[in-house]
Image (tube, rainbow, N blue to C red):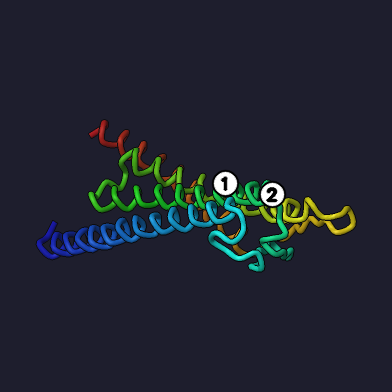
Amino acid sequence: MTDTLMAERADRLARIRRLSGFMKWFLTVVMGLVVIIGLFLVVTLCLPADLLFTADEMIDIADVERRMGDIPLGQRIAIAGLTGLAFFLIAGACWHIRLVFKRFQHIEFFDPRTLSSVVSFGRWLIIFAIVDLISDPVGSALLTLDLPEGQRSIDVTLDGGELFFLILGSLMLVFGWILREAALIAEENKQFI
C-alpha cells in the first residue's frame, strides 16, 4: 500500500472509532433515560390516585381515552405491565446496538460478538414491533374492561412506527446473517493462504 492509501485508511478508522465512541455513550444516556422514564410511568400507573397524578389526568391508548381516577387499580397495574414491557424492549434494543458501536470503536467489524449483537438488535426490534402492534388492542381492552358491555372497546391500529421497527429489525437481522456468512468466508480464505 502506498503512504496515501495508508493515511486515508487511518483517517477512516479514526472517524469510525470517534463516531462509534460517541454513539456508544449517546446510547448509554438514551438507555438510562428510557429506563428512568419507563420506571416512572410504571410506578405512576401502579400508585393510587393523587400521589403522583391527579384523578382528572387522562390516559389514552390508541384512540381510547379515560380519566386516571376512573380506572381501577388492577387495570392500571396491567397497563403498567404492558408499558413496562415496551420500555424493557426499547432498552434491550438500545443495549444491543450500543454493543455494536462498542465493538466498532475497537475496530472489531467481523468479530462473532459484533455480528451476534447486530442479529440480536434486529430480533429485539422485531419483538418490539410485534408487542407495539398488539399493545393497542390489548391496552384499549384493558382500559375499558370495567365499563358496561356496550362501552368496552378494542382499538386495532397500524401505524408507521410498527412498520418502521418491523422493517428495520428485519433488515438488521438479515444484515447480521449476511455479515456472519461473509466473516466465515473470509476465515476460510485465510486458511487457504
Q: Amino acid at mark 1?
A: Ile
Q: Which mark is residue 127?
A: 1
Percent x, y of residue 103: 29, 48
Helix, strand or loop for disc 1: helix
Label 1 vs label 2, nearer the camera: 2
Residue lying at 49% horizontally and 54% vertically, measured from the top left: 38
Specify the farthest residue to the right: 150
Q: 78 or 46, which is in the foreground?
A: 46
Percent x, y of residue 33: 41, 59
Instruction: Give the spatial CA distance, label 1 vs label 2.
Output: 24 Å
Q: Amino acid at mark 2?
A: Gln
Residue 76 in the figure: left or right of residue 106 = right
Residue lying at 35% horizontally and 59% vertically, measured from the top left: 29
* Position of the C terminus by quadrant: top left
Observer able to see residue 158? no
Q: 166 or 136, which is in the foreground?
A: 136
Q: Is residue 109 above or below residue 33?
A: above
Q: Which mark is residue 75?
A: 2
Specify the farthest residue to the left: 3
Judge the density around disc 1: few (<14), some (14-19), many (≥20) Cα neighbours within 10 Å: some
Helix, strand or loop for disc 2: helix
Residue lying at 47% horizontally and 58% vertically, measured from the top left: 37
